[in-house]
Image (cartoon, rainbow, N blue to C red):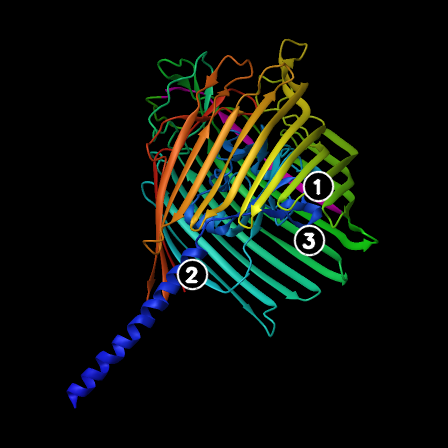
Amino acid sequence: MRKNLFACSLSAIAMAAPAMAQDANTIVVTAQADNATEVVNGGEAGVLGDVPAENLPFSIRSFDETLIYNQQPLTIGEVLENDPTIRTTYGFGNAAEQFVIRGFSLFGDDVGVNGLYGIAPRQLIAPELFGQVQVLNGASAFLNGAAPGGSGLGGSVNLLLKRADNDTARATATFVGEGHIGGSFDVSRRFGAGREWGVRVNGAYRDGEVAIDGEDRRAQVLGSALDYDGGPLRVSLDLAYQEVRIDGLRPKVTLLADAIPAVPDASANYSQDYTFTELADIFGTLSLEYDIAPGTMVYARAGARRGDEEGIYGGIQVTDSQTGAATSGFHSYIPYEQDNEAVEAGLRASFMKGAITHTFNLGGNMIWQQDRTAYDFFSPFDTNLYNPQQVAIQPSAFAGGDMDDPFPITERKLGSVFASDTIGVWDDRVLLTAGARWQRIDIERFSYFGGALETEYSENTVTPVVGLVVKPVEGLSLFANYIEALQEGPAAPIDPDISNSGEVLAPRMSTQYEVGGKFYFDPSIFATLSLYRIQRPGEGFEPDGEGGTRFAYLGEQRNQGMELTLNGEISPGLRIITGLAFADAELGTGLKAPGVPEFAANANVEWDLGFLPGLTLTGRVTHTGEQEANAANTLQLESWTVLDLGARYVFAAGETPVTLRLTVDNMTDEAYWASAFDAFNPALLQGTPRTIKASASVAF
């Protein structure tokens, strides 16, 4: 009897084994496909809505959350390293990321969230909260309105908070650099009779030293989303919290010498141990859409953010490029608080009249911002780029504002009304968009000494947009656009040697011309080629007539260039994200703009090895060409190239897919100056050293 039972058991196992193997293989194949990094060709084009890229007279693409999981970026800037048309640097002597697009800066303050300005955290944005990072190249003042920080002329970035698009549950453990360890969770569910309700909650915590010696980063985020899709009515509520701290941030290197210093070791850190940045933000958005008739929708969205930050910020100013002798410059302690609100409402109606289609957009938006801050700058001390000396915090040199309870320094109110019509003929193979936005910018600037009103601007204008799309054959979309923009003026640096220190210049106008083509010759392959020219008033320093220097508009800056991007699956299991950019940025002086490389290129490759199920090899090459390091064009940075290599492996633990990832960024540990882009002074940002990244994800 026992022999019969044993024989029956063996027989049952033998019969079940092929099915079990087949189920495990299905789990691996499905999970490997779900982990494939991709680019979404299209995105939220502001007032025009969510439009496929081939129907837009602008260049737009979106990096999705799979890329964030696979590459383990610590900031949004590291996500945008995948885009050949964008390079990332720091600004303002602290950890604030700014993005160089078409030779112009985009501040972190001017990154959008769910289509609204002023809602994203300042300085640094942790990427774990977002489902898409959308990039639109070129001026977008008509599409999004004026950015409150006055940047974004060369392009815009919009972040979409994660939503419950499907049922998922994932837990991930991560490791980066020398000891930066963390974990995250992500759970979403749809429910209701028609799955009309959705809930998603996700969070992450990570802390520890990264690959730069002594640089410690900590981030904790928590996000939640509730949405309802009940046919004609769609409602969504997103709430998020982010807290970031960096100790010992490796600073930019300001040049007071007449030559470029040799690059220190790749992992070297020349910061002071006491420097830190601490940021805390709570933010959210509420969106409503209602279809009042077929093809006609009204919508409204609102957002708010409260940000609190403080830091002791430091830099280093090299006076002798041979020996590395340097001064610290003015290190500073700066508290900063900000309250922002934004609203937008509109109507979008699509209909056909005869053989002609129309899509009307009407609406308006408002943004309110209040900045409360103060400053205390410390006396400089001597140090050395190659042998930095640790010192105590130095005595105060000059200060302004209330350090304990900062009062308002800047208040902004931006409002606009817009209207556009997209006319389609020849079965929408020709699409002509014409529109205008009335934009008003009100800015009040208050004194650090007592809070009295110092400067006040109130500017308004009508900025037009014209865009044309022609699709002569299947798979080809030609486009052109002309757009004007009104922007807040730049602020003079806080410096006692500048006669108008801290002053915000009057708003300025800019224009953009662009032509290009988009090629979608396969459902999964998409290429974009564009040529552009952007003009705006430049800024710089001039004599103030009293023996000093003042910050002012100087001449006209003209940036022009060409961009080519390509992404998709070029053969089964082989995916690419690649492209190149040529830029010619000229200041009003006729010289080249510093920090804008003439050539940049990226190539990102993923290969699913069919003969080893579950294994994917990854690689990325990033190249940045020569760039001017100062406005006089007497100093140049050499070109640099970085290689990243990695792999991920998916296997089934029972019925649970597990994904293991390992990547080495900057495989050869190149030491290089990555960027010379800076708003005021010649300053160099050193590139990130070799960085090991590892993670393990379990999807339940």
Q: Secondary structure at mark 3?
A: strand
**92 or 51, which is in the foreground?**
51
Disc number at residue 226?
Answer: none
Residue 381 drawn in magenta? yes
Disc number at residue 30?
Answer: 2
Q: Position of residue 680 (x, y in %)?
A: 56, 22
Q: Position of residue 335 (x, y in %)?
A: 53, 37
Write the start and end of the magenta stretch as one range.
364-385
Query: Is tag 3's residue or tag 2's residue first in the polypeptide sequence?
Result: 2
Image quarter for residue 261? top left
In this rendering, is residue 671 above or below 159?
above
Tag 3 and tag 2, C-beta contact below 8 Å: no
Disc number at residue 301?
Answer: 3
In the picture, the quarter occupied by the C terminus is bottom left
Q: Can you see residue 640?
A: yes
The residue carrying pointer 1 sits among few (fewer than 14), some (14 to 19) or many (20 or more) residues within 10 Å by Cα, namely many
**537 or 612, which is in the foreground?**
612
Q: Amino acid at mark 3?
A: Arg
Q: Secondary structure at mark 1?
A: strand
Q: CA distance from mark 1 to mark 2?
A: 38 Å
Q: Amino acid at mark 1?
A: Val
The residue under label 1 is 470
